Image: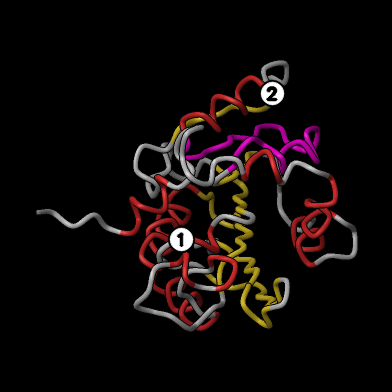
Amino acid sequence: MAVRNQHDDIIDMWKTASSPNYRYFSKVEREQDTLVFWAPATPFRRLFETLDLTRTLEIACGHGRHAARVPDRYESLTLLDTSIDAISHATHRFADNPKIHTVLSADGITLPLSDDSLTAVYCYDAMVHFEPMTVFGYLKEIHRVLAPGGRALLHHSAYGENPEGPFTSSPHWRNYMSPSLFRHFCSRAALGIVEQVVMDWGDVPQCDALSLIEKPLS
C-alpha cells in the first residue's frame, strides 16, 4: 500500500470546508488576531513596508484576512491557496476589487505565474506548518517568479525539535525547521537573506522566524 507523504496530509488539513482545520480561517478573522502581523510596532509590519507592492503574491491566503488589511496598497495582488473553498471565499470577498486576483494552487509548491513577473511575495501564519522540502520547493519557485531585486517576506518555523514526528505533535503545529536551515535553502535557491528575525510564539520561545529575502539583480 502506498504511503501518503506529509506534504499532502498538511494540504488536506485545510483543503475544503469539511477538512479538520478549515474553521481556522474564520476563527482568525478577528482584528485582535491580525495585530501581531499588522500593528505598526511589529517586525512583520516593519519589514512589509520594505516591499515593492507593484505586483504582489500572497501564498496561503486563506479567506484573505491579510489582503483585507491593506487592499489599496497594490497595483496587482494575486492570492494563492491550496484550499478549494478558501479560494472560493476569497474570490467572492474581493470580487469588487479589480486589483486582486485569486488562483488555486494545484500542488502546494508550484506557483502558476510567469518568470520574473512579481515585485513581492509574502506568506504569514502558514509556512510555519510546511514540510521542509515544501519550503525549499517554494523558495525555488519564488526565485523564478520574482523580478531581479524583488523581495519575499516569509513567516516560517524556527522549531528545530521533533524532526521525525508529524507537525501536529509539535507546539503550535510548527514543522521542523531552523533559521540556519532556512538560510541554507535560500542559498541553494539563489536568494539572499536581507534580514531574519527569530521570535517567540505564544509560550514557546524562539520557535518562529520571519525572513526577508531578495532575488539578486544579476
Identity of the residue drawn at 54% across and 55% down: 148
Q: Where is the N terminus found, in terms of image quarters?
A: bottom left
Q: Is residue 16 left or right of residue 194?
A: left
Q: Type of residue at label 1?
A: Phe
User: Local crowd at mark 2 within 10 Å, few (<14), some, or many (≥20)?
Assistant: some
Identity of the residue drawn at 18% across and 57% down: 3
**Residue highlighted by disc 1:** 130
Main SS type for the magenta part? loop
Q: Type of residue at label 2?
A: Phe
Q: What percent of the width, then of the height, locates residue 146? A: 52, 50
Q: Secondary structure at mark 2?
A: loop
User: Local crowd at mark 1 within 10 Å, few (<14), some, or many (≥20)?
Assistant: many
Q: What percent of the width, then of the height, locates residue 19? A: 46, 40
Res 117 label: none
Q: Is residue 21 above or below residue 201?
A: above
CA–CA distance between discs 2 and 1? 26 Å
The segment highlighted magenta reads: 61-83
Q: Is residue 133 above or below residue 102?
A: below
Q: Is residue 75 above or below residue 185?
A: above
Identity of the residue drawn at 54% across and 71% down: 192
Circles 2 and 1 in contact, beta carbons < 8 Å: no
Q: Is residue 177 magenta?
A: no
